[in-house]
């Protein structure tokens, strides 16, 4: 299904929208980009938390035999895992919805929602979020240059 998007009188942009109304339509001012920004934030939290747990374990090993670190890990790892599970689903969806909103706006940059959604999906599935951080940061950089947000 091709969608014509009018930006100015006499100017139209076309992009493929194979999902049509299957996913929600958003405005360029919506907050779908928060899900995209959550990818690098969650990766940073997981990395910093893992480093603290690793170094904390060596100090805790002498104090309590590692029991305190084991208890914190028992709480930290499932929370990070649940956040990763939610982002595995929401990151590609949010990227598609937000790219479609930017493409339908009058912004200079016209991202192809299908391409960006597939990049998000592939980076999650094939690289376990390591490439997702790069893709998300690049998308947010391009979005900021076109829209001004984030």
Image (cartoon, rainbow, N blue to C red):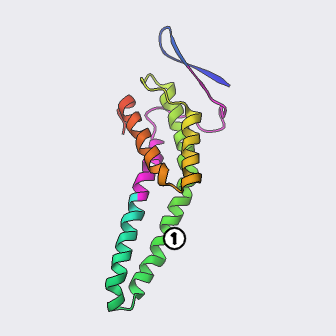
Q: Residue at x 49, y 49 (%)?
A: 132
Q: Residue at x 65, y 33 (%)?
A: 21
Question: Which residue in the protein does label 1 denote?
Answer: 78
Horizontal placement of 40 versus 112: left or right? left
Asked if 60 appears above or below 28 in the picture, the reply is below
Q: Quadrant of the N terminus?
A: top right
Asked if 123 appears above or below 76 in the picture, the reply is above
Quarter of image, res 53: bottom left
- Is the residue marked by circle 1 packed among few (<14), some (14-19), or many (20+) residues within 10 Å? few
Q: Position of residue 134 (x, y in %)?
A: 43, 47
Magenta stretch, residue numbers: 14-43
As rendered, which of 32 and 140 lies closer to the eye? 140
Asked if 93 appears above or below 114 in the picture, the reply is below
Question: In the current view of this chain or complex, which residue is farthest to the top?
Answer: 10
Horizontal placement of 44 versus 131: left or right? left
Q: How many marks?
A: 1
Q: Position of residue 47 (x, y in %)?
A: 39, 64
Q: Residue at x 48, y 71 (%)?
A: 77
Quarter of image, res 62: bottom left
Q: Residue at x 38, y 30 (%)?
A: 147
Q: Circle 1 — which element?
A: helix
- Residue 38, magenta (yes or no): yes
- Residue 90, magenta (yes or no): no
Horizontal placement of 73 versus 122: left or right? left
As rendered, which of 19 and 110 lies closer to the eye? 110
Q: Position of residue 112 (x, y in %)?
A: 54, 30
Q: Quadrant of the C terminus?
A: top left
Q: Position of residue 102 (x, y in %)?
A: 47, 30
């Amino acid at each position: 299904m091709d969608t014509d998007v009018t930006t100015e009188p006499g100017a139209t942009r076309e992009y493929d929208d194979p999902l049509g109304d299957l996913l929600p339509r958003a405005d360029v001012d919506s907050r779908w980009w928060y899900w995209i920004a959550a990818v690098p934030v969650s990766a940073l939290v997981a990395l910093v938390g893992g480093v603290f747990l690793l170094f904390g374990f060596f100090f805790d090993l002498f104090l309590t035999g590692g029991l305190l670190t084991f208890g914190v890990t028992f709480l930290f790892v499932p929370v990070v895992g649940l956040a990763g599970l939610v982002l595995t689903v929401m990151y590609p969806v949010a990227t598609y919805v937000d790219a479609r909103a930017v493409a339908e706006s009058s912004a200079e940059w016209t991202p192809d929602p299908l391409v960006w959604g597939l990049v998000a999906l592939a980076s999650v599935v094939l690289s376990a979020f390591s490439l997702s951080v790069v893709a998300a940061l690049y998308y947010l950089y391009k979005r900021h240059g076109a829209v001004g947000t984030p």
